[in-house]
Amino acid sequence: MTLNQFLKKNKWQSFWIIISSLLINLLALSSALYVIQVFNKYLTYKLETTLIVLTIGVFIAFFLELLLRIVRGLLVNKLSVVGKRDFVDSNILKAFNLKIGILGSKNERYFFEKLKPNNLSVNVDEAEKLVSIIDIFFVFFFLSVIYLISVQLGIISSLFMIFYLFLIKLKKHLIKDITKQRDRSFLNTNKSYSQISNLASAIRAFNSKHILYPLFKLDYARQRVADIKYKNFNSFFNSIFSVFPILTTIFIIFFGAQEVVNQTLTIGGLVGVNILNSRMFGPINRFSLLSHVLSDNEKDINLKTSKVMTENINGVNPKIISGSVVIKDLSLGFLEKKETLFQRLNCKIPSGGIVVINGYNSAGKTSLCKAIVGLIAPLKGNILFDNIDLSKFDISWLRRQICYLPQEVELFNVSIRANILSNLSDMQLKQTNDRIILKTVSSVGLTDYINKLPNGIHEKVEDNGKSLPVGIKKRIGLARAILNNGKIIVFDEPSESLDNKGVFDLYKILNDFIKLKKTLIIASHDPNILKSANIVIDLSTKPIPRIGIRKKKKANA
């Protein structure tokens, strides 16, 4: 959100922030005026009532300023939380709608990392920005007052302020590489520890401590060096910034005292100038820090999002889909590695067709399945459903027409039931009762497992199902795939990790799909599934895959 958008969205709150900020800065003048009046009037005329009145007045101004600062702080904090809520909500929607496979895996991870809700570096706070802009305005106002009191002292204050800004700019420039080096060292240390925590069994099984421990010690040593360098750098500049107002005071007193002796400036005026000057450095420092965060965020997010494509969630969604698929001049590969899996794949799959994708490991079977589901973007070519390009569809609607089973099933940290129902629309959820769910669970061979769980089908999946047996995860994924009753079936190595009973259940499901004239696209090495194909896409042939035509048979148990 830009500052202009913030002002339009929060007109009333912005009005009170501006008013309170103006009053706070005007009241800040009271201390300087108090000193000037005490020196010029009380010390000259020695009237106690004058001192009492001036002191009472400055105390009133002090407490009013304090009260306004508290009220403004509460208002800014409230708007900051609301603003962050909207900002986080916007980022989460970006995370859900990011078209993966465009930026490359490294940049995708970076993008998702930047969109983390608790990533403080992306908390763009427009309320604080508004306050800082107003305070900066009053810095120039205070400087103008100093010029009115003494032109010479105004020039001195201006020079020191310019030099202060130069030091801030210099620090920003020099710290970039140091910060990158520190962040990189922290990342490497975290990666080293991730191996220790994530591969605990392998480390013990293969006695790998002697390999990983020295690597961790080396990464952590580099992190400490980078961290010390970063802290020392900050400490050096912070020390300069903390004594800078004192240095300015020395010069103001030195030259101001000469003006007092020459009777071109009063003592009260000299002290008042010193107070006003000391109030200028805080707002400058706060604004520089805020603008630094904002500019870095804009570079980080905008540079990345300028290259990001979001998925089409407002495309066409026909009432029915026949199930015909056309793969047209398709090339798949990895952008970041500049590697092509295959090129110029052309294949027409009629409604009710049975296609088996075959090939050696890493030939591109999983990538082709993902491309058909719209999970990765092709380097070249198109995939059409009912002669409509995949990119033209409302992608959420299209995926509900596809029964998709990935090779590696990923589960969410919700109940088993919620995992199975996750691909259903609101309308489908209303039409899906417990009888249908239990029938699906039974068809994939999950009934016995679920009956042994304390909460049955409502048992919550933990750690994204990493602790679950692979065969159970495959069955849950299979139940999730078939429940939405899509016209197109895309299964990636469906018989992998299943026992004999699981394979038997799978064949029965596939035979039922064939009877229902659904379009089957299956990546598999299973010879029984391969026998059932009437079209075989052989990705072992490079760079252009070979297409084979066979007679249609049932899958055999």
Image (spheres, grey):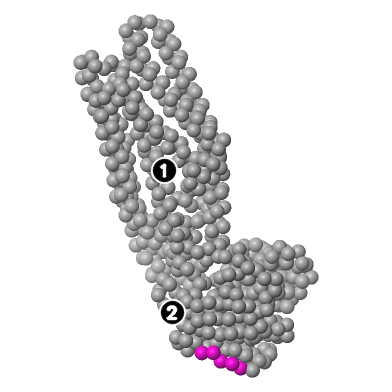
Tell me if residue 59 comes above or below residue 493 in the rendering. above
Q: Position of residue 126 (x, y in %)?
A: 48, 43
Pointer 1: what residue? Answer: 290
Between 210 and 169, the one lying in front of the other is 169
Q: Is residue 122 visible?
A: yes
Work out whether mark 1 precedes mark 2 in sequence or the reverse, and give the earlier one: 1
| Residue type at the position of mark 1 | Leu
Whole-number angstrom distance, CA of label 1 to CA of label 2? 44 Å
| Residue type at the position of mark 2 | Thr
* Residue stretch in magenta: 546-550
The C terminus, quarter of image? bottom right
Secondary structure beneath disc 2? strand
347 part of magenta stretch: no
Pointer 2: what residue? Answer: 340
Q: Quadrant of residue 415?
A: bottom right
Q: Residue at 46%, 18% (x, y): give it.
A: 59
Q: For this view, does 492 lie left or right of residue 425?
A: left
Between 322 and 99, the one lying in front of the other is 322
Tell me if residue 437 comes above or below residue 517 in the rendering. above
For disc 2, the neighbor class at 10 Å (few under 14, some 14 to 19, many from 20) is some
Q: For this view, does 226 lie left or right of residue 297?
A: left
Q: Position of residue 363 (x, y in %)?
A: 48, 83
For disc 1, the neighbor class at 10 Å (few under 14, some 14 to 19, many from 20) is some
